[in-house]
Image (cartoon, rainbow, N blue to C red):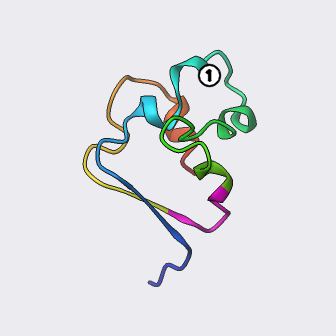
Amino acid sequence: MTIRGRAHKLGHHIDTDVIIPARYLVTIDPAELAKHCFEDLDPTLRARIAPGDIVVAGENFGQGSSREHAPQRNR
């Protein structure tokens, strides 16, 4: 299998609070949540990720507080 796309390297310890900041948990609208994905890590990152791109992260990606909002945004 070959996977192609631009890669975005995030580093280690990208927890659920970094994926979707807690202040946006008042909504469950996927489109609204997507606007704020990785916002506190790099406010410009979301705009640079395009369909087909690959997000690469290190240890403990997705760890942290239990919230279903974070993994929903990583599709």
Q: Quadrant of the N terminus?
A: bottom left
Few, some or many C-alpha atoms within 10 Å of disc 1 (few <14, some 14-19, many ≥20)? some
Eyeballing the image, is 59 above or below 22?
Answer: below
Eyeballing the image, is 3 above or below 9?
Answer: below
Question: Farthest residue toward the bottom?
Answer: 2
Quadrant hosting residue 25: top right
Eyeballing the image, is 45 above or below 70?
Answer: below
Determine the residue positioned at 62% across, 59% down: 49
Magenta: main secondary structure equals: loop
The kind of residue tagged 1 is Tyr
Determine the residue positioned at 62% across, 22% down: 24
Determine the residue positioned at 52% across, 20% down: 22
Point out residue 73 in the picture as x, y percentages from the top left corner.
58, 42
Secondary structure of the residue carrying tag 1 is helix
Point out residue 29 in the picture as x, y percentages from the top left corner.
72, 29
Question: Farthest residue toward the top?
Answer: 26
Determine the residue positioned at 30% across, 42% down: 13
Q: Is residue 49 magenta?
A: yes
Point out residue 47 in the picture as x, y percentages from the top left corner.
68, 53
For label 1, the residue is 24
Eyeballing the image, is 73 above or below 22?
Answer: below
Q: Is residue 16 magenta?
A: no
Tell me: 12 left or right of 33: left
Magenta part of the chain: 48-54
Number of marks drawn: 1
Camera-side residue of 50 and 72 = 50
Tell me: 16 left or right of 73: left
Tell me: 32 left or right of 37: right
